[in-house]
Each structure stands twice: as structure tokens, then as C-alpha cells.
Image (tube, rainbow, N blue to C red):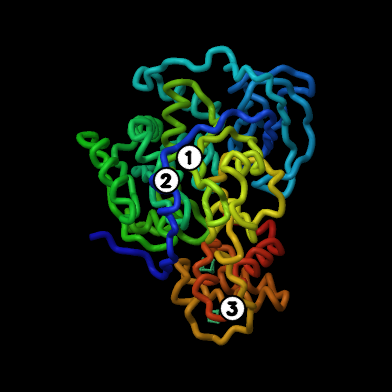
Amino acid sequence: MLKTFRGGVHPKDYKSIASEITVETMPPPQRVVIPVSQHIGAPGVPTVAVGDTVKKGQLIARADASMTSWVHASISGKVADIAEYPSSYKDKSLAVVIESDGLDEWAPDIPAVRDYESLSLEELHKLIGQAGLVGLGGANFPTHFKLTYGPEKHIDTLLINGSECEPYLNADYRVMMEETDRVVLGAKIAMKSLGVSRCIVGIEDNKPKAVEAMKKAFEGTGVQVAALPTKYPQGAERMFIKVLTGREIPEGKRHSDIGVVGLNVGSVAALANAVEKGVPLIERVITVSGDAIAAPKNLRVRIGTSFQDIVDYCGGFSRTPEKIINGGPMMGYAVRSLDIPVVKGVAGILVLSKDAVSHDEESPCIRCGKCVEACPAGLVPSMLSILSERGRHEEARRDYGLLNCIECGSCAYICPSKRRIVQYIRYSKSKNAGHGHK
Ligand code: SF4
Ligand code: SF4
């Protein structure tokens, strides 16, 4: 039996709203807005100009930096604009706007047919670097950076994350159920790229069908599939690594410093498509759910499709929405407008009525300690929120581990005073910009 991590909470998961709905491919939209920065690291620099004709899969932005990710056209058509647009990743980002020509034509040489086993390591790394892959679990970390670590990092373990512990979201679950062969192939490619023989797939035990499907698919490959105790935030990188390997990431360090690389299942499936078919990351699976969307769905959508187009495709609102969230209710962000595009890290759109949103007023901390018990990072969330309120942001960082907060929301979820602890923490972090982790 696997050990669990400290803290954590058990929010109602609401997954059954959409979990058994097969992924539907949304037709390509008439217009996409594709930010050149959808990832951690250097933003891409546009390689196209207004008026250019582009094909699906064509490179439209790149940067010459190790920590970056290429960006590709997700539809064929004409570049209508290159300017700052609202984004679902940052408030605003330089974006390439493409108006569809209705043809949806691939760029030359896509799709290709390749056998990953016959590729040299150099060829493999080059292909991964050109595919625009980022962590699809929401981390937005460039995948090629993770898969091309040198021997000095002593990476010995690949972990594949199918936890999907956020309530409502089913994108990873559907990928495991419907793209099983892609996940297996992607895992083999990632293992070759890293030169590791140890690989574990971790899935929360509230998804028994996915555990079963993955166990069957990986039979005879040497890859282990582990059912993890369901507890939020099981899918957070630090918790996931700790539970599966017993290793802890020291303060200020990364997964690679303890010999582990973790990839989301969706990223692994996208890796298989990138290497075997030469198809860059131009679409992803998202869950559209909540009690105020007319038809909840799991959808394959093109990167750059607007939230508005997606909501319309799902039949619009079934009742007045009180809150629309980019992502899940625990770690996602409320959006003010539907005029923002889906970027690579968007796993879902939640449309919630007033009945599904808490209206409790925030009150002063009663020092009950529940947030401390719930914090998986071992912090004192009550203190962090109070220091933030008082403007003592540096003290929060220096003495209370502010930057170790993974913004999981467990503290705010459990707090009887309904304190908006994560908002306080995010604000303090913004005041400590420049002191981020390595
Ligand atoms: S302080 Fe941060 S890591 Fe701890 S429970 Fe709150 S949001 Fe999660
Ligand atoms: S859970 Fe809320 S009320 Fe209790 S100590 Fe934490 S911040 Fe204070």
C-alpha cells in the first residue's frame, strides 16, 4: 500500500457530470488567437507577418532559448493581426490571429510517419524541441526541457501523472480511456529520450476504469501502473513524486534535482503524436462542465479557440452563470470575459451558477489551525494570509516559506472563516517577484 502525503482535503469531485462522455472533436473555429507565450520561459518571437498565408501545424513563433516552446498555427488561413490580446495564461500576451480559409490544410511534411526506435537520440531531441509541447496538466513547463536533461542530472525515473485530482475535470481520464495506445507509445518515447528504464504511471483510485485500462495497455512493458489514494492535491508534482518514489524536492529545487521527471498523461499522448506523426501541439482535450452549461462535454479543441466559441458549441448557458473558471475550482482562475483563447495549459472551463458558488463572507481568522493541518506543503497559511493583509510580504517569504506554496487551495477550502487565503498568497508572491524558485 502506498503511503499518502501530509495534509490535503477531500472536496466533492463532481466528475460524474462529464466523466463518461466520449471526447468530441469541435470543428475548427473561424478565427484563432494564439499567444506566443503559453509556457514558462522565453516567449516566442513571431516568424510570420500580417497578411501571410499559413497552414495547420506551421511554425508561427519561436525563441532561441533553452527554456521556451515553439508555437504553431492551429488552423490554415491568413494572419489577420499580430498584437497584444487578452490571454488565459497571462493577462495579456502578444498573439498571432489567424482567420480560417475553411480548408484546414496541413503544412508540408505533416503528418509524417516515423519509427521512434530508429531515431538517434539527437534526432529525437530535435523533434521534441520543435513540437511545441508543454505540460498539459496546467504547469506549462516546456516538455523538451524535461526530456533532454544531460547525464549530470542523474535522472533515473519517469513518472506519468494521471491523477487529475481537480474536481470536475476529466480530460486526462478520457485520454487514458480513449488514447491508451498513445500514452503507451509516448511513455516509451519519453523513456528513450531520458535513457531511463523505470517508469510509473500514477492514477487516483477514484478512476478504476482508467487504472484497469492502463494496466492492461502497459502489460509486459515493465512500466508500473499504481492506483493512488484519492486525496487532493494528489496530482501536484511534489505530492505525486513523494507518494510514488518517497523522494522530496528540497526547497528552491526542482524535480530534476532528485532524479525524477514527471509528465502529465495528456503530454505523453501529445509526445507520441509529435514524434510518430510529426504533429505539433495544436489541439488538446478539455472538459467543459458545471451546473450552468447546457451540454457538458469533453472536447478536443484547437489552441487559440475562444472560450466564447466553446461555450456556444456546448449549447450556451442553461442558467445564469455566476462564475466561469479557467481550470478546476481549486487551482483555476475566475475569468472576467469569454473573449480569451484556450492555450496549451487549459484543462477545462467550468460554468457555475450561484448555487454552485460559495457566497460566504470572509471573516477574521479564529486560529482553529485547520488550514495548517490541510496544507500539503507544511506551511502556516493563516499566518501567510495575515502577513499579506498587513503588507508584510517580505517577511512572509523570508520566514514563512511563501514561495513553497503550490496554490492548491486546500487551506481556503477547509477554512471555516472562508478566508481568501490563496488570493492573499498570490498577492504576496507578486510583491516578491524576482525571488522565484530556480
Ligand atoms: S498555503 Fe499554499 S500549499 Fe498550503 S494549503 Fe494553502 S494554497 Fe496549498
Ligand atoms: S482555517 Fe481559517 S480560521 Fe482556521 S486558522 Fe486557518 S485561516 Fe484561521
Image vertical order of residue 126 relative to residue 397, above or below: above
Report the residue marked by disc 2: 262
Classify residue 403 by image quadrant: bottom right
On the rendered structure, is 231 left or right of 407? left
Image vertical order of residue 202 relative to residue 412, above or below: above
Q: Earlier in the sequence, mark 3 or mark 1?
A: 1
Report the residue marked by disc 1: 146
On the rendered structure, is 15 left or right of 30? left
Residue 14 x %, y %: 44, 58
Q: Is residue 42 visible?
A: no
Given contact means CB atoms under 8 Å apart, are the residues at marks 2 and 1 in contact?
A: yes
Report the residue marked by disc 3: 383
Q: Nearer the viewer, residue 199 or 257?
A: 199
Question: What distance separates the C-alpha of mark 2 from that of mark 1?
Answer: 8 Å
Label 1 secondary element: helix
On the rendered structure, is 177 left or right of 148? left
Residue 337 x %, y %: 71, 50
Q: Earlier in the sequence, mark 2 or mark 3?
A: 2
Q: Nearer the viewer, residue 288 or 424?
A: 288
Residue 406: mark in rendering? none
Residue 90 x %, y %: 69, 48
Residue in view at x 71 percent, y 24 percent: 47
Query: Where, quadrant-wise, is the N terminus in this rendering?
Result: bottom left
Q: Residues within 10 Å of mark 2 (few under 14, many from 20)?
A: many
Question: What distance separates the C-alpha of mark 2 from that of mark 3?
Answer: 31 Å
Classify residue 312 by image quadrant: top right
Residue in view at x 64 percent, y 43 percent: 307
Residue 246 x %, y %: 33, 58
Q: Is residue 420 visible?
A: yes
Q: Earlier in the sequence, mark 2 or mark 1?
A: 1
> Label 3 amino acid?
Met
